[in-house]
Image (cartoon, rainbow, N blue to C red):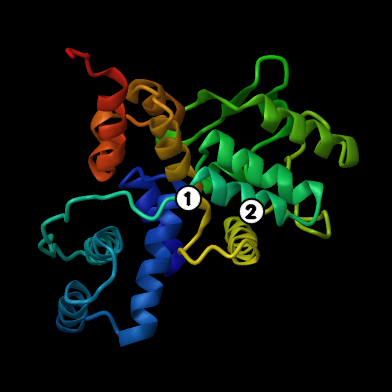
Amino acid sequence: MTQKFEEYLCIHKGLQPVTVSGYSKAVKFVENKIGELTQEKVENYICNLYQSSFSYSHKVSQARALEYWFEYQGQSIKFGRQRKPKSLIKDTLTEGEITKMFLCCNNIKQRAMLAVLAYSGVRPKEFVRIKRKHINFGTNELFIEDGKGNKDAVIYISSDCVNILIDYLTVFPKQSEDLMFLTCDYQRPFNTGCLRKLIHVLANKAGITKRVYPYILRHSLAVNMINRGCDIFTVKNQLRHAWVQTTLLYLNSLGYGLKNAYEKFRPSYT
């Protein structure tokens, strides 16, 4: 039944494989939790979910997955959506904290992985698909193939990051089509779960008490660039946001960022 449901999402709803997989897993999770997916049971589950402390995106994703499930079963059931809370970017990592994480790396592979995340701002799902051919060492560019929204893009990495990657490839040579990072047995692609564990371990070793996960390095790149005086459109292009309003969340969440910009550019009358 799961395969048929996934085929329905793919063929009739036109969803991408990663989205299909996410909705399928969500429905399976709810089924394991409450048993048979009857309308009454699911409505009780949604009620409890909406009163929980789970994130807004998690609640919406679960509700949408269950709506698709009932639609697949021939029923038209729609759940209301709670008002989306005001988004804030918080608990990002300072340049000093990320430096501490680099000092805690055990080997060149860990340094290379951290460097790509910290300097490029790639999303974890994009990171695990990076191949040798995607890195241009002459222009310090990183090609993102089939990123979010199925979009290709070119972003930048620093010369520091490039030097670390050159050292990494000296120890672990790669062919053009090879994935840049594999698991410790060099047999399987490095997945997002392994990446999350690595970043968590490095943060603990560095003595960082914040909740640290791969995506926070993307947020931290934006915040640290803004604090250095970078304009919002450069940050938008590096993070590949579709709308500048998304990038503005970083400014709206960091009052001192605006203050720093004011102090830098204000006129002097006395």
Answer with the quarter of the image where residue 5 lies: bottom left
Residue at point 37%, 46% (across, down): 15
Q: Are marks 1 and 2 in contact (CB under 8 Å)?
A: yes
Picture residue at 73% right of the left edge, 40% below the top: 180
240 sits to left or right of 213: left
Badge 2 crowding class, 10 Å Cα cut-off, few under 14, some 14 to 19, many 20 or more, is: many
The residue closer to the viewer here, 47 or 87, is 87
Determine which residue is flagged by label 2.
101
Look at label 1 and name its amino acid: Leu
- Placement of 194 over or under 146, stated as above or below: below
Q: Nearer the viewer, residue 209 or 71?
A: 209
User: Does dot 2 land on a helix, a strand or a loop?
Assistant: helix
Q: Is residue 73 above or below residue 103?
A: below
- Give how far across and how far down residue 17 sits, in percent: 47, 48
- Residue 174 in sight from this viewpoint: no
Q: Secondary structure at mark 1?
A: loop
For residue 46, which quarter of the picture?
bottom left
Where is residue 140 shown, x and y percent of the image? 65, 21
Q: Residue at x 27, y 36 (%)?
A: 251
Q: Nearer the viewer, residue 53 or 68?
A: 53
Q: Which residue is mark 1?
A: 93
Q: Quadrant of the N terminus?
A: bottom left
- Quadrant the C terminus occupies: top left
Nearer to me, 192 or 42: 192
Residue 239 showing in the rendered view: yes
Q: Residue at x 14, y 83 (%)?
A: 40
Compared with 144, 25 (above or below) is below
